[in-house]
Amino acid sequence: MHLLFATSIVPDGALASGYEIANAAIIAALRRAGVRVTVIGFTWPGKPAADPENTVVLGAIDVRTDNASARQKLAWVGKALLSGLTFASVKLRAVSDSDVLAVIEQAGPVDGYVLNSVQFAGAFEKLFTERPSIFVAHNVEYLSARENAAAAGSLFQRLLFRREARLLKAVEERLCRRARFVFTLAEEDRAALGVASDNRSAVLPLVTGTHTPPKGPRRIDCDAALIGTWTWQPNRIGLDWFLGKVVPHLRPDFRIRIAGHMPSGVASKHPGVEFVGRVPDAQAFVRSAAVIPLISTAGSGVQLKTIETFELGLPSVATSRSLRGIDHRPANCVVTDDPVAFAKALEAAAADIRDVDGSAFRGSQVKALDAAIRLGLEELEPARQEAFA
């Protein structure tokens, strides 16, 4: 079976975000199941595709809003309003439908499509209807947009996110209706998308690219460490909650390091908080902390940082939202949504560091991921045979 994996940004091997980590895990699982996978999408500027022999590239593009000039942002908004597309999808309309069709032809005959998330599929929706498809819903995007609207700091942002939510709900409904099978990353997302029956969808338990951590004691350089794409609004909401509600209850000498590009306006009066920007080795960075705060309070889908923390066997304190899509919680993870209890649990974990073996967790995730992929392919096969009959 030859499937075209249609995504906004093709893998470049860096695994710099949760989205990229999830894509790598899903593509690897499809190939373990015997599928020939060709990836189609854009590259980041200056970052070639990691697997060029199995990738067709539409061009280089930077779709990050925080990297764009005010003029570019206004152009995107105007184009979205005129086209009726979402703000996220209109950024990908840097090429025409005919350009995309020409690139699809380069991939050769395909049996079906894997439509990876709503952004690319929504930008070129009409081009992927003549073959059976699987839709991968990384999140329930319309619900995330609603949460973003509620947390927006200006009327303009609030109105923009409300528009996104309305349009995304319609696009996600169409993609799910047309798909022969839907993969989600969290159980609750199946019901939210209206595909909760087992012959319509399955949850993909993900793994990261994490290698088995070195044996022996870790070198601890700080009490707690966080790393993430903080410009993504659901992550920003969680960070604001952590800095505003949890950190004030931590003792003054509690050392917190926060890595990743920080949007303007993020700050903390706590003397132990340090914003360190980009780090060369994300795994080494989190392993240098006594405890990992898992702080998701918004969004849907699964938290890849939670999975990586569990794979590494690191102590953690998590909100209940951080555990969505994960069935197994290790013994060294404390769960609470109360800010004061969260702070106390962080201090207790940092004072008594207890790592665990994360290999069993990773092994169970891989086994369940492969089983879910097989379910989706079994549902796609009759449609593939029908299309070529």
Image: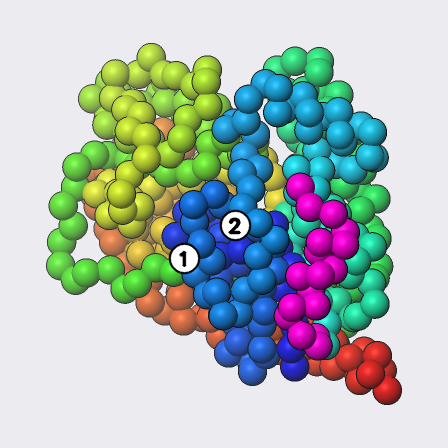
* Rendered-image quadrant of the C terminus: bottom right
Let me know if residue 19 appears in the view.
no
Seen in the picture, residue 383 relative to 194 is either above or below; the reply is below
Callout 1 amino acid: Gly
Residue in the picture at 83% in, 29% down: 82
Instruction: Please rate how many residues cluster around mark 1, counting C-alpha atoms within 10 Å: few if below 14, some from 14 to 19, many from 20.
Output: some
Q: Which residue is mark 2?
A: 43
Question: Residue 270 or 61: which is nearer the viewer?
Answer: 61
Q: Is residue 342 magenta?
A: no
Residue bounds of the magenta highlight? 94-110
Instruction: Please rate how many residues cluster around mark 2, counting C-alpha atoms within 10 Å: few if below 14, some from 14 to 19, many from 20.
Output: many
The earlier-in-sequence mark between 2 and 1 is 1
How far, Cα to Cα, is label 2 from label 1? 11 Å
Where is residue 152 shown, x and y percent of the image? 63, 20
| SS under mark 2 | strand
Where is residue 154 shown, x and y percent of the image? 65, 13
In the rendered structure, the answer to whether residue 145 lies left or right of residue 312 reads: right
Callout 2 amino acid: Thr
Residue in the picture at 66% in, 37% down: 91
Q: Which residue is mark 1?
A: 13
Tag of residue 188 = none
Let me know if residue 55 appears in the view.
yes
Residue in the picture at 28% in, 35% down: 224
| SS under mark 1 | loop
